Image: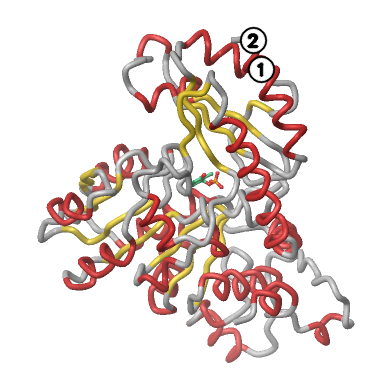
Amino acid sequence: MDISFILNELGEERENYFNAIAPPIIQTSNFKFNTVNDFRNALADEFQGNLYSRGFNPTIDILRKKLAALDGAEDALVFGSGIAAITIPVLALLRAGDEVVCVENPYSWTIKLFQDFLPKFGIKTTFVNGSQVQEIENAISPKTRLIFLESPNTFSFDVQDLSAIAKIAKAKNIITMIDNSYCSPLYQQPIAYGIDLVAQSATKYLAGHSDVLAGVVTGDRKLIKQIFEKEYMNIGASLAPQNAWLLLRGLRTLPIRLEKITANANKVIEYLEQHEKVESVLYPFSKNSKQLDLAKKQMKACGGLLSIILKEASLQKIETFCNSLKHILMAVSWGGYESLIIPACAGIRITDFDLQQQRHTLIRIYVGLEEPEYLIKDLEQALERI
Ligand SMILES: *Cc1c(COP(=O)(O)O)cnc(C)c1O
């Protein structure tokens, strides 16, 4: 489907709302029925239509159609946050005694889901280095029901071979799910590689303005319906119509934002790579990346997230550098208009900090929509301080 059609027209039945160009926010919790029979039919199968906005709502519906089409999927569910779009489908797919194979060091709350939350229900997870397909294969047991991927990872940018892993999983009847937040559907299409479920934090690129929390999962209709009917409705982490509308608005400019962000990131990387105080820059398409061929095979581009390691890094150097930035803001999240920085050491207790572990010394930078020269000037003056 044409991306312009998806973003500008798909799901928008303007004749239903006075031919308004922008869709309405249907700010309602519930919908009325004219006969008991209609009411009974709706209650019997809530997946079919509008009954109560914890399930579906017309503004949400437009968004679901667009997000499913962007991923090349049959259907989509949207959630009140990205982590709900991971947790709820995972809970729907698993039962006590099942096992999961998950890539090591995914998004922090994904780790907590598999490490702390699921064991309460008798579900065990094995974390493996996903860059080796063999390690994933070796971790599979007869009880494995799910393989969870995050490619690229959003801190270290490790990449997994999506089609090879999907093939192994299909042969063993194991469901594959990926967190595709890094690439967005514009830069990576996991379903085309055989992945079953694609989750994203829509808070990031899709919404794009640092003003809304949302999540999405896409896949075939049977799986989506299974997730909807029990865990989605029971846990109730639904997206509010107002936030669905903000997402629809954000989506209009997704291609142009990503294009500019990617171009900006490339200029910033070029600057950082030649800087004498920078040891290395981590980015999936970096010419130094060990996984460059695989990344280029399955991704169109990379976007604005990268990490750097300072030369002769120390806690003090990392802190001085980050504290000195004036325009690049220190904050969590990414995917909005503003450039951000987050040193890994901010998430580690000082007594646990280990200079020998590369993961501890990473400084993640998100390049936003500012002009690259403006960002480089800020980086320059902060690097001068160390
Ligand atoms: C932010 C993020 C999430 C969680 O999304 P929320 O919208 O914050 O709940 C999940 N995965 C990745 C890779 C993220 O960056």
**The disc label shown at residue 382, or none:** 1
Q: Which structural element holds mark 2?
A: loop
- Across and down, in percent, residue 378 comes to 72, 24
User: Do the residues bearing badges 2 and 1 touch, measured as CB atoms within 8 Å?
Assistant: yes
Tell me: residue 353, above or below residue 279. above
Q: Quadrant of residue 91?
A: bottom left
**In front here: 336 or 269?**
269
Query: For the residue carrying disc 1, how many other residues have a C-alpha within 10 Å: few (<14), some (14-19), or many (20+)?
Result: some
Quadrant where the N terminus is found in the figure: bottom right
Q: Secondary structure at mark 1?
A: helix
Q: Is residue 11 visible?
A: no
Question: Which residue position is annotated with label 2?
Answer: 385
Q: Position of residue 186 (x, y in %)?
A: 57, 64
Q: Which amino acid type is marked by label 2?
A: Arg
Is residue 181 visible in the rendered image? The answer is yes
Establish if 183 lies above or below 339: below
Residue sitting at x 51%, y 8%: 316
User: Which residue appears at 18% of the width and 49% of the height?
Assistant: 135
Q: What percent of the width, then of the height, locates residue 275?
A: 57, 24
